[in-house]
Amino acid sequence: MRWLLLLLACLSVAGPARVSPARAAEAEVDLTLVLVTDVSRSIDDSEFQIEKNGYLAAFTNPDVIAAIRGGAIGAIAVTYIEFASSFEVKTVVDWAVIRDAESARSFAQRMVDAPRSFWGRTSISAGIDTAMKSLAESGFQATRRVIDVCGDGTNNHGREVTEARDEAVAAGVTINGLTIINERPANWTFAHVQPPGGLTNYYRENVTGGPGAFVLEVRDFASFGAAMTRKLINEIASRKALGPRSG
């Protein structure tokens, strides 16, 4: 008993563990960004691979690297999450700090190399909820926190996406969107990928929100990389979307 009291006394004198200045500096970034990508069954394997290649092209684009290095700290922290149904959500690539072309390519290559996680329904809300949990546990210090949702359909599983969106926005997080328009959907997916008013408008009204939030639209998977490049530059530089809010 005496040794236990002595140990407690030593701990009380020592106080809580302190983070070294070097480690604290490593945790400071301009932006924490969660990439949340739809891998539901309406996206086939070839389209999924085009998405992955698009991410690689975007993160290795010199303009994206310049935007990262142009920040006050010159670094961002990024993680990549895939989702389908509400019980099918996975962090595929954990948090990584990107400061230059080498670290950007390393992160993007891990995304490309990772196998597809799911093929289920579409729970955007579960993707947002998982992203919020990841932000809370990341350990990074950033003035801006952004969730980047990419998908080709509406929320059709799990809780209401507006509930997840509103909670994230209330916590100071911005949610941006990238909608992929399927011009020739299968009959069983038509209402899902082409809701009344269009998918991009659905994202504006139900998914995105927060300071400077925007939606970009791509009408085919081949232009995904270019759209993602635009999106990353806007998010990293904290500017509104270039040109129209969709296109």
Image (spheres, grey):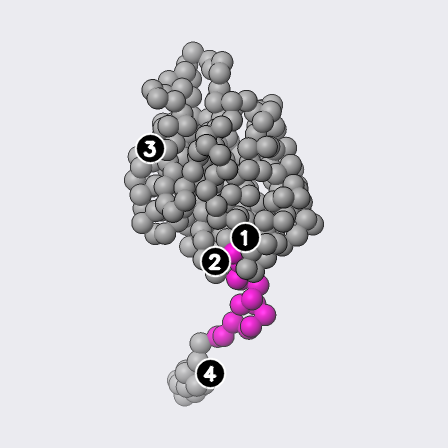
Which tag, 4 or 3, sits closer to the chain's start? 4
Between tags 2 and 4, which lies in front?
Answer: 2
SS type, badge 2: loop
Residue 131, can we see it? no
Q: Quadrant of residue 164?
A: top left
Quarter placement of the N terminus: bottom left
Q: Mark 1 near mark 3, Cβ–Cβ under 8 Å? A: no
For mark 1, does the 10 Å Cα neighbourhood hold few (<14), some (14 to 19), or many (20 or more) residues? many
The stretch of residues the image draws in magenta is: 17-30
Q: Write the residue at 53% across / 68% down.
A: 24
Q: Write the residue at 65% across / 41% down.
A: 61
23 magenta-colored? yes
Above or below — where is 196 with respect to 165?
A: above
Residue 169, given in percent of the width and then of the height, sits at 34, 47
Distance from the alpha carbon under mark 1 to that under mark 3? 28 Å
Residue 243, given in percent of the width and then of the height, sits at 49, 34
SS type, badge 1: strand
- Residue that label 2 marks: 142
For mark 4, does the 10 Å Cα neighbourhood hold few (<14), some (14 to 19), or many (20 or more) residues? few
- Residue that label 3 marks: 205
- Residue that label 1 marks: 77
Of residues 108 and 116, the one nearer the viewer is: 108
Of residues 159 and 77, the one nearer the viewer is: 77
Which tag, 1 or 4, sits closer to the chain's start? 4
Distance from the alpha carbon under mark 2 to that under mark 3? 27 Å
Above or below — where is 180 with respect to 113?
A: above
Q: Write the residue at 38% across / 47% down.
A: 211
Q: Mark 2 near mark 1, Cβ–Cβ under 8 Å? A: yes
- Residue that label 4 marks: 14
213 magenta-colored? no
For mark 2, does the 10 Å Cα neighbourhood hold few (<14), some (14 to 19), or many (20 or more) residues? some
Distance from the alpha carbon under mark 2 to that under mark 4? 29 Å
